[in-house]
Amino acid sequence: MTTVATPPRRFGATMRRDRWWVQPVLVVTSLTLFGVYTIIHAIVSKYYAITAGGAHLQSPMFSPDLPGIIQFHTSLPWAFLVLWAPLGLRSTCYYYRKSYYRSFFLAPPSCAVAGVARRKYTGETKFPLVLNNMHRVFFYFAVIVIGFLWYDAIRGLFYHGSFGIGVGNAIMFINVFCLSAFTFGCNSWRHLIGGKLNCFSCTPTAQTRHSAWKKVSILNGHHMQWAWISMFTVWGTDVYIWLVSSGAFSDPHHVF
Amino acid sequence: MSETAMAGGPRRLQIWRGDLTGGELVDYELETEPGMVVLDAVLEIQRSQAPDLAVRWNCKAAKCGSCSAEVNGRPRLMCKTRLDHLPADQPITVEPMRAFPPIRDLVTDVSWNYRVNKQITPFTARENLKPGVEINEKGEFLIDQADTDRMSEFRKCIECFMCQDVCHILRDHRMHNRYYGPRFMMRMASLDMHPLDGVDRLDQIADEGGIGLCNITKCCTEVCPEGIHITDNAIIPMKERIVDQRHDPLLKLLGRTPNKGRRKPPPRTETPEL
């Protein structure tokens, strides 16, 4: 077999023997299904809160609850007014960037596998991909959304003002915990909390930030796992609330 | 993994033979011993079957970074890749690094990396170091352990250039004149994070260095034989510093600019061509 040791090579050319294509296929499938599901539910804009029996369990895809909090009523799918922040955080997240550049853009589909030939590769230097540098702006807004999600989870513990607990509550708390772990393990937060400092030891404030940076670095080390786990917990929470609020079954809970 | 592979035995290697004008994979059969690495097999072939086979190696201990090659399509150190970790039922392919021009057989011309390295201003101490805190009476620099920990990870680099080889910007897009590559992003990160350094390198990282071309697919991290988190600990922090400098509206509003007080580096020439 004659080969030339210098590219360019056709798409997918590689001497790798392993099943390098499995990961891109899984990522494309999962992200596409999640994206399509989210858009469909946002357009439908129904069955996003469990209110039977004095409960108030709000889907994370519809939080903050604009109609409930500020009496914002519209026939249009209002969820897009709140979804942009968490979806923007995810789509500009360094981990998701790796995933979709590999799986959707095929640039490259896997390490040492030739990507799609492009007339001119510009990476993240030109519009629209240069907007990925706005990740931390989405982070600022996503932190506000996380605050509302904790509020929703705590509010869900009160049924007509009485404390109660049920399966829905557990799901809500697991979800907001996972979302917090994803959000506060973010590379931008790791930078802002201390990574941007050149001297960790110079001042007492810098020492405190160094300590915080080390803790965030631990969380950041598992950012990929938290990204997937939290995506599935958001999805699962929304599906549960959709099913219960549409009457498919009831949410088992006990009011004290 | 079969017992035969664990115990050594006959194996077939396909080694790329050629030069800049082209080449081909040539089959070699050999009897292997238990525990052999790819470099052992290649050297045995060179000794017994192909004395003109060109291969670069030195320490055989995964510390000199000389024997980088592509084994079964993945950048690896030949001296660190055991034969019994590779599928026994298939031939083992050994090719030179694709991101650099082949000189002959498995030897590539990596001199472009050294030319890029010369573009980077070395450590240059700040002018206003605090006596007794940052510099002692003998002129020795003083630095806290907390500040060296982060940079010491980057000092593990053995310059095998496998991160450069697997980087698709260099490997597939051949943009050697626009992007320094992960190895030098890491070097610049270690200098930029140095508390005693007095040079502002952010413009160079963004412009001549071309960090914006990196789309953080993390292949450099995957192939690093020293386990350095190149993307998470060097490239992404540098991208974030560029965001501080150029893209964060909040910091712009507050008038916060990174690397305040550091002086600009001397003018650079253009990024070297391959």
Image (cartoon, rainbow, N blue to C red):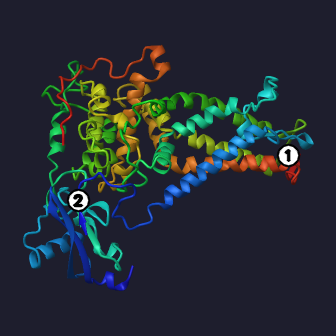
Residue A245 tag number: 1
Instruction: Tell me if residue B9 comes above or below residue B43 in the rendering.
Output: below
Provide the residue designation for mark 2: A4
Residue A238: x and y, percent? 74, 46
Instruction: Tell me if residue A89 comes above or below residue A255 in the rendering.
Output: above
Q: Are marks 1 and 2 on the same chain?
A: yes
Residue type at the position of mark 2: Val
Q: Are marks 1 and 2 in contact (CB under 8 Å)?
A: no
Q: Quadrant of the C terminus of chain B?
A: top left
Residue type at the position of mark 1: Ser
Q: Residues within 10 Å of mark 1 (few under 14, many from 20)?
A: many
Residue extending farthest to the left is B51
The front one of B240 and B194 is: B240
Q: Chain of mark 1?
A: A
Mark positioned earlier in the residue sequence (1 or 2)? 2
| One can see residue B232 in this view | yes
Residue A170: x and y, percent? 75, 49
Residue B244: x and y, percent? 42, 25
Residue at the spot x=19%, y=60% of the render? B67
Tell me the CA gap for discs 1 and 2. Answer: 62 Å
Residue at the spot x=17%, y=57% of the render? B66
Snapshot quadrant of residue A1? bottom left
The front one of A1 and A70 is: A1
Left of A131 or right of it: where is B98?
left
> Which mark is in front, 1 or 2?
2
The front one of A228 and B42 is: B42
